[in-house]
Image: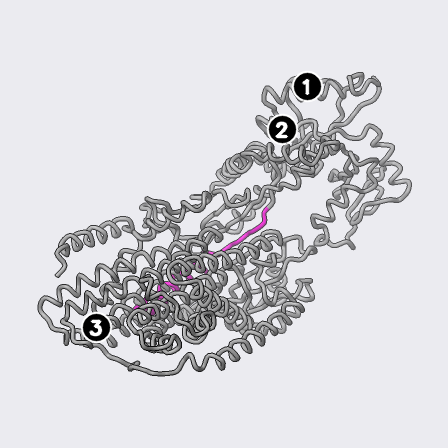
Amino acid sequence: MDKHALWKWLILLLLVVGSLVVVWPPLDKTDEEGNVIRSGKIRLGLDLKGGTSFTVKIDEEAVEEEVRSRAEEMSDAEARREVAKILEGSQERALEVLRNRIDTLGISEPNIYPGKDRRIIIQLPGINEQKREEAERSIKSLAFLEFRMVHDKNDELVMELFDAGKAPQGFRIARVGGEDVYRRDKSFPDREMDRDYYERRKRFEVPGPDYEFLLQREETENQFVYRPYFVKRRAELTGDYLKDAAVDFHAMGQPVVQLEFDSRGAKRFGLVTADYAPGGARNPDPNNFRQLAIVLDGRLYSAPVIREAIYGGSAEISGSFSLAEANFLANILRAGSLPAPVEIVEKRFVAPSLGTDSIQSGLRAIAYGGIAVLAFMLIYYLISGVIANLALILNMILLPLGMIVAGGFLSIFARDASGGGPIRLPVLTLPGIAGILLTIGMAVDANVLIFERVREESKVGKRLWTAIVAGYDRAFVTILDANLTTLLTGIILFIFGSGPIRGFAVTLCAGILVSMFTALVVTKLFFGLIAQKSSAKALKMLSIVKETKVDFVGKRHIAAVVSVALIVASWGFMVYRGVQNPSAIFGVDFTGGSSVTLTFDQAHRVATEDLRAALDNAGVQDPNIQYQREMEQGGDEYLQVKAAEDAESEGKATDLIARTLTAAFPESAFRVAQEDEVGAQIGAELKRRAVWSIVLALLGIIVYLSWRFEFGFAVGAIVALAHDVLVTVGVYTLFGRQLSLPIVAALLTIVGYSVNDTIVVFDRIREDLRLTRNQNFLDICNLSINQTLSRTLLTSLTTLLVIVMLLVFGGGAINDFALALCIGVLVGTYSSVFVATPVVLAWHRGRKPDLGAKGK
């Protein structure tokens, strides 16, 4: 027996106690008014708690444009160096500024942290719609403050525009208050005023490349008018020197914003005003009064006349503000000036009610999936099944500790990792719950492999403990190889993923680590207790899959035809649909665009055709409309509408969809439960990173299998994995589902799971090559597939049990995720038998590889 068993029991006890300590109490305790009086150890993500998430990106293009406007003779290399200098440390500075702004809104427990590529993620849990809009306004109002000179002949240039009847697109000339001004042309829709439009408008009739055309909005005679100015592109002074901002009032009660500069800014402001004051160094004409434009984030707020040098370090932004607008502007400026312009490239909102439903459906899926697996293992493996079930329960208990270890380890691979680390539980997300459920299914994989090995050793007449030891020894290498490849995919998921995808990666890796420990160490301890008082008959097990002698390899040509036909048919249909409408294939994660999930009165369910007609009339381009049931049959339904990004929508398709449906079908009482907005740029980046993550996972598997087996075996595994990915994607899209970031996580999980299956077969081939000398390679391959068939079918069955629970009880993206996994597990089981091994046979052309001789 194991002489170190006592120490192992003590270590297990300490791990169990430690894991319970780090997770207890699990959730927040609140009083009757909802105030948290005791914080829980489990931190819920926005998809479970509800709230809003913004992804903000520093606009490098705007920085480069500003640099070149200051010195057009600058070479490309010099410009790049100057941009790099400005951007150095910009993320940290912007992070602090945005954190200060959010803090002024009174939002509790905001989570603001750096992301990849100079991005900043702002997560605001549990906020209402009013706070969400206020936060978005604060972020969008970038406070990139500039002081620029107005053209010295601006009045003449403007008069020439009006005399010639010229107006920028979207405006018309009007006579208001006895003078010519511009007014908005209502025939030109707001949605067409995208970023390209504003760039075009800046160049409208400019007197030279050094100037921009800007409009100052004012309220005159109860209507908004716009005064044109030709403003120098080069800034004389920026908001970096701003010290304070406050609201003041003119004599007539008009609110203005007073600015105060620091000592450096006061000096620089004094020099600028002295140079351009009448008679100054840059304005020698004593009768010429130059104007200084105050530009905030590309918008002209005021253009006061410089009458004399101002050395006091103060300035004023005056305009047609309401008191609320003036206070808002002062708050933005007071919070700090950003080192560079930023833009919101991704926005996600989840209502608290939807988060509660997600928790309930997730817990229900875990409970039912766990019960199904426990029942199956108990019925099929009897006493051994009891041991496997105890190990599975210990898996769940030890998982929090495993998540801390996995989160701390994975954070090594990404400096921007948030939530988690060596001493805190990672944030629990909905994909994280899916990872926990998948862990339940995959955890029994090692137990099934061991039990089947022990069964084989018992059949040859070995005593109980000898059979147990031999079973564990023979299964160890296979379990190690299979789980390391899955762990590799988890690491790649974490590196290339973000937010909830990382939560899934942490849970997946934690489940692998914990399940290996319980399967290889804990279950052996339980078997040691049984072996002291029982015989081999005590480990009697059912055997649904008897010994088979099927010529699987002989059917490889038929399987190849079936696989190729399925791939060509499904991908042909997918490409056909994608060419007609890319948003029918790719979700907003990849195309950019908007996704809105709405609740509604179940008694007034609107037909999809009527919804589409209303949205088409409102200008929503090619909406993808789906009804989804969040929980089990009979539960509430949600309506999900997705629309690809359109230049005309100006990033506000979510508002347009919600307004349109609310107005068109008031009896349905539509309410927004979740919103996602993703810019086209970040969508393209996510698509590129998704492809790279899958490619790198495959390359890593090639390297590992080439080392552990031979290159020919690596080729077989990669062909099988490529087959699995292609078939899964093709069949998945046949169901009318869209490819999104969670589906990439599902594909990588399928890669890890499928190679797990394949390695079990390859490991048995390696063993049979060593033990069977009188058979050719084809027969040995057939023998190995038949020997592992029971294990392959059983582990696929247990994994499918929990995935089906996800499919039934999971809603939204988790339902899509579960469908992809379900297809992938079925296809992966097929490819391990009919694709991977035949490719290895073809590679070696019938000759035996020397794996047995090398003793790998």
Residue on which the image places disc 1: 270
Residue 599, label in figure: none
Q: Where is residue 220 in the image (x, y as percent from the top left)?
A: 76, 39
For label 2, count other residues whose C-alpha is less than 10 Å away and answer few (under 14), some (14-19) or many (20+).
some
Chief secondary structure of the magenta span? helix
- Residue that appears at 37% across and 60% down: 708
Q: Residue at x 39, y 68 (%)?
A: 849
Q: Which amino acid does label 3 sit on?
A: Glu
Q: Which residue, given by chain and number where applicable, does mark 2 sit on? A: 248
Q: Quadrant of residue 75?
A: top right
Q: What element carries label 3?
A: helix
Task: Check disc 1 and report its element: helix, strand or loop.
Answer: helix
Label 1: how many Cα within 10 Å (few below 14, some 14–19, many 20+): some
Residue 208 versus residue 183 in the image, above or below: above
- Label total for image: 3
Labels 1 & 2 near each other (Cβ < 8 A)? no
Q: What is the span of residues highlighted in magenta in the rendered image? A: 344-370
Label 3 to label 2: alpha-carbon separation: 88 Å
Q: Which residue is drawn at 58% across and 55% down?
A: 683
**Residue bearing the label numbered 3:** 457
Q: Nearer the viewer, mark 3 or mark 1?
A: 3
Does the CB distance between marks 3 and 1 fall below 8 Å? no
- Residue 823 in sight in this render: no
Q: In which quarter of the image is the N terminus?
A: bottom left
First in sequence, mark 3 or 2: give its number.
Answer: 2
